[in-house]
């Protein structure tokens, strides 16, 4: 069963301590995501006012950006 919600999937999985998101800068604005086991940054979403940003497959959700330097989001 699928549904849409403004809450992240972790809110429904029962995990008490979700992994922290990180924010990175990109040419269009900002990326939000998490690190995988190898330390690569995996995009969860892009935050931009430029419509071209959402068409750029390099920053699509699930895309691996590599070893981007990011800051931890509180």
Image: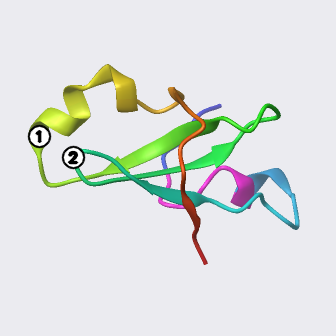
Give how far apart the Cα atoms at labels 2 and 1 are: 9 Å
Residue at x-position 74% and y-position 36%: 36
The image quadrant that residue 45 belongs to is top left
Seen from the viewer's position, the closer of residues 39 and 59 is 39
Say which label, 2 or 1, has the lower sequence index: 2
Q: Which residue is mark 1?
A: 51
Image x and y of residue 54, in percent: 24, 35
Q: Nearer the viewer, residue 16 or 35?
A: 35
Q: Is residue 4 above or below residue 24?
A: above
* Quarter of the image with the N terminus in it: top right
> In this orientation, which residue lies closer to the viewer: 39 or 45?
39
Image check: 19 left or right of 7? right
Q: Residue 50 location in percent, x, y?
A: 11, 46
Mark 2, other Cα within 10 Å: few <14 / some 14–19 / many ≥20: some
Q: What count of labels does the image hold?
A: 2
Q: Of discs 2 and 1, which sits in the foreground? A: 2
Residue 39, disc? none
In the image, 27: left or right of 58?
Answer: left
Residue 27, image x, y percentages: 24, 44
Q: Is residue 42 on the magenta stretch?
A: no
Query: What type of secondary structure mainly makes up the magenta span?
Result: loop
Label 1 neighbour load within 10 Å: few <14, some 14-19, many 20+ = few
Name the quadrant containing residue 73: bottom right
Image quadrant containing the C terminus: bottom right
The residue tagged with tag 2: helix, strand or loop?
A: loop
Residue at x 33%, y 21% (from the top left corner): 57
Which region is colored magenta? 5-11
Would you name the residue on which mark 2 appears? 28
Q: Is residue 13 left or right of residue 1?
A: right
Residue plotted at (54% across, 29% down): 62
Above or below residue 60? Residue 26 is below
């Amino acid at each position: 069963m699928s549904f849409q919600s403004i809450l992240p999937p972790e809110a429904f999985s029962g995990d008490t301590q979700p992994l922290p998101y990180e924010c990175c800068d990109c040419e269009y604005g900002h990326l939000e995501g998490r690190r995988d086991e190898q330390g690569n940054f995996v995009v969860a979403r892009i935050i931009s006012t430029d419509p071209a940003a959402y068409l750029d497959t390099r920053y699509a959700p699930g895309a691996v950006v590599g070893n981007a330097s990011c800051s931890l989001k509180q």
